[in-house]
Amino acid sequence: KNGNWKGGKPKCITCGKEIFYTSKRCKNCHLISEEYLTRIIGNRPRPSKLELQIDSIIQKYHLPYKFVGDGKFFIERKCPDFININGEKIAVEAYYKRHKDKFSGGFENWKNDRIKIFAKYGWKIIFIEGQRLTEEKVIDQLKGVN
């Protein structure tokens, strides 16, 4: 293999320097390459409709979370949808259970895997189910009211 991938050498989206096709990070600025990021989170449009709904509630009520589901933040190849911006290690995953059930191992496996990986680094994770989503439900979960 000569370093060519998809018709040309991949370039860092930040500094523009060429990255070898197997590299995960740019040697110049140490950011994840665009191609590697695409392989991790896929080519799906971001953010999803559910993530947009939750983000609009976050913005409306000035909750301390920001969207990072487009690859801005990773914990062991896991990219949460939102993270807390007040210094607390809290990640948020928005999902539809019927979609996660299609994954290998099913919903419970997906959820337990996320909890285990995030906990290893001291992160708490909040799961928000998209079915019958309401503002009150999102606010209660993000403010810690159950």
Image (cartoon, rainbow, N blue to C red):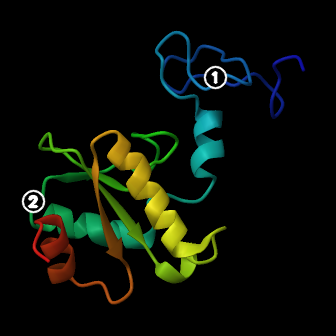
The residue identified by callout 1 is: 11
Residue 81 visible in the picture: yes
Q: Tell me the amino acid under the disc marked 1.
A: Lys
* Residue most extreme to the bottom: 132
Residue at the location (50% across, 17% down)? 15
Q: Is residue 98 left or right of residue 35?
A: left
Does 94 sit above or below residue 84? below
What is the quadrant of residue 101 in the picture? bottom right
Q: Tell me the amino acid under the disc marked 2.
A: His
Does 114 sit above or below residue 86? below
Residue 80 visible in the picture: no
**Secondary element at tag 2:** loop
What is the quadrant of residue 87 in the picture? top left
Does 143 sit above or below residue 65? below
The residue identified by callout 2 is: 62
Q: Nearer the viewer, residue 103 or 4?
A: 103
Image quarter of the N terminus: top right
Q: CA distance from mark 1 to mark 2?
A: 36 Å
**Where is residue 45 drawn, in percent x and y?**
54, 59
User: Mark 1 or 2 closer to N-term?
Assistant: 1
Residue at the location (48% across, 47% down)? 78
Residue 43: numbered disc: none
